């Protein structure tokens, strides 16, 4: 549950300061942001006037400096308001790097998700409103496991059988404030002129709106979690929390409490290579099955969405705990067909096949033919883990180990792909990819990062072979 921190790890320090009420009044929020936007906009206009007779180099330097300063100032003001507007800013930072100025995304990335907790009296009132007499079935820990902009998580025990559960409690009023906050955020960007008002911006802002409403749709998240539970319940490598429908409402999501350690924890990184390899393989296999088998994907590859329940290295295996199914997306069949064709071409390390695989997808079809080979180079490199040293002479000599497994950390794949992509995007014909395509790309980047962090060696080619015809 990325929205409310990690529901399976207790906060190390007790919350000494809490809020008794979340401010969701649209009038108060509008006034706060209007003042901040006017101040930032005035400063921006002043810079443009003040650099009228400066050299172009000095103008650019000054504008970048002021843009960074004003973006950080606005982000600071947004952070004070909490609620959905903070989450909107975080989503814009995560998905907007292709159309937002780097100074703006850097500032937005500083928005802190570890917000001050809502007081227990306010949470208890909300739980009573949502659960009624069912709340008497539970002993709820008053100290939250995690807090975020839209909700906070509390551990509880069911009195009748001692079952440990977690309750993700949506803050009162945040769902109703989403549309208003989206309007405020958009007006702020327009007034300050920090972001060009382009078609790409409009499309991504609409996507942020859709994602925000999904974030607070707990019945949908519960159904998605149950779907993944059914798919993986018999696979000993995974744990998906069970939804406890008895205590689920539109404002409360209830599931079993699952203990584990973060994937980037010291204990994880100290595991023997063989155990890390198995965990890595299990993780990336999910991504492949999402694309080739399930036609839907967890599009938020946040490290906080994974835990590991450690075994004993003998008869009890390590298990990957999958959390937060609020960001699951289905995809258009044509996009899935193209994405699979790209991987198919990468599997064969065939650049001509890669260019042909782009056919039939509007984003690629609009490109002049001469620009496609550069884009194909990016995909060829990105699919390197699906190849072998025998069919891929372009792979670094140390990208595969003696058993033919891909060595993620040693291959430096992520940085190489980013460099290759940056070179390809210099074409004047390059435009921002459709958001659906970017979701798939981001998921693979997240999976690759996971493998690199735990220094896994994996036979990804074997996982893909069954889907390659």
Image (cartoon, helix red, strand yellow):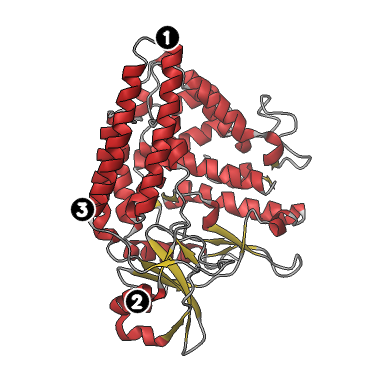
Q: Which residue is mark 1?
A: 55
Task: Tell me: 314 left or right of 249.
Answer: right
For marks 2 and 1, the one nearer the N-term is 1
281 in relation to 375, above or below:
below
In three-dimensional space, the C-alpha distance between marks 2 and 1, rounded to whole angstroms, equals 61 Å
Task: Tell me: 451 left or right of 28.
Answer: right
Q: Nearer the viewer, residue 330 or 447?
A: 447
Q: Is residue 439 visible?
A: no
In three-dimensional space, the C-alpha distance between marks 1 and 3, rounded to whole angstroms, equals 43 Å
Secondary structure found at label 3? helix
Percent of width and height locating residue 66: 41, 28
Residue furthest to the bottom in view is: 160
Residue furthest to the left in view is: 27
21 in relation to 467, above or below:
below
Mark 2 vs 1: CB contact within 8 A? no
Q: Residue at x 63, y 34 (%)?
A: 413
Q: Which mark is residue 127?
A: 2
Q: Is residue 162 visible?
A: yes
Percent of width and height locating residue 355: 47, 23
Determine the image quadrant of residue 91.
top left
Determine the image quadrant of residue 74.
top left
Secondary structure found at label 2? helix
Q: Which mark is residue 305?
A: none
Q: Which mark is residue 27?
A: 3
């Amino acid at each position: 549950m990325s929205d409310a921190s990690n529901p399976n790890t207790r906060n190390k320090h007790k919350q000494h300061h809490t809020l008794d009420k979340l401010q969701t009044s649209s009038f108060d929020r509008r006034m706060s942001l209007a003042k901040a936007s006017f101040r930032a906009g005035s400063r921006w206009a002043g810079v443009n006037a003040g650099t009228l007779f400066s050299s172009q180099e000095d103008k650019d330097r000054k504008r970048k400096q002021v843009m960074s300063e004003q973006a950080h100032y606005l982000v600071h003001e947004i952070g004070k308001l909490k609620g959905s507007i903070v989450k909107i800013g975080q989503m814009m930072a995560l998905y907007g790097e292709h159309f937002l100025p780097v100074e703006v995304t850097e500032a937005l990335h500083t928005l802190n998700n570890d917000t001050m907790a809502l007081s227990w009296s306010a949470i208890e009132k909300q739980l009573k409103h949502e659960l009624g007499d069912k709340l008497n079935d539970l002993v709820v820990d008053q100290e939250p496991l995690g807090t975020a902009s839209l909700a906070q998580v509390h551990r509880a025990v069911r009195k009748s059988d001692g079952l440990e559960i977690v309750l993700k409690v949506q803050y009162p009023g945040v769902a109703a404030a989403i549309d208003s906050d989206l309007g405020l955020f958009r007006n702020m960007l327009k007034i300050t002129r920090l972001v060009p008002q382009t078609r790409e911006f409009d499309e991504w802002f609409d996507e942020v709106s859709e994602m925000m409403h999904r974030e607070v749709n707990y019945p949908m998240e519960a159904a998605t979690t149950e779907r993944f539970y059914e798919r993986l319940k018999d696979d000993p490598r995974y744990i998906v929390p069970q939804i406890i429908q008895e205590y689920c409402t539109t404002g409360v999501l209830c599931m079993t409490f699952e203990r584990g350690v973060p994937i980037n924890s010291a204990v994880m990184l100290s595991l023997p290579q063989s155990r890390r390899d198995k965990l890595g393989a299990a993780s990336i296999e999910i991504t492949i099955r999402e694309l080739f088998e399930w036609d839907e994907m967890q599009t938020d590859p946040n490290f906080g969405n994974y835990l590991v329940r450690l075994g004993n290295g003998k008869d009890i295996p390590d298990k990957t705990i999958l959390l937060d199914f609020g960001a699951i997306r289905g995809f258009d069949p044509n996009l899935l067909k193209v994405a699979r064709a790209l991987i198919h071409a990468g599997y064969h390390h065939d650049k001509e096949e890669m260019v042909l695989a782009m056919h039939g997808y509007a984003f690629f079809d609009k490109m002049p033919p001469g620009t496609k080979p550069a884009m194909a180079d990016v995909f060829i490199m990105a699919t390197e883990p699906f190849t072998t040293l025998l069919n891929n002479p372009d792979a670094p000599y140390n990208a595969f180990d003696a058993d033919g497994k891909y060595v993620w950390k040693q291959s430096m794949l992520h940085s190489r792909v980013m460099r290759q992509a940056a070179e390809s995007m210099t074409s004047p014909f390059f435009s921002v990819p459709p958001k659906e395509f970017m979701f798939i790309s981001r998921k693979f980047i997240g999976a690759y990062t996971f493998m690199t962090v735990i220094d896994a060696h994996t036979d990804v080619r074997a996982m893909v072979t069954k889907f390659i015809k």
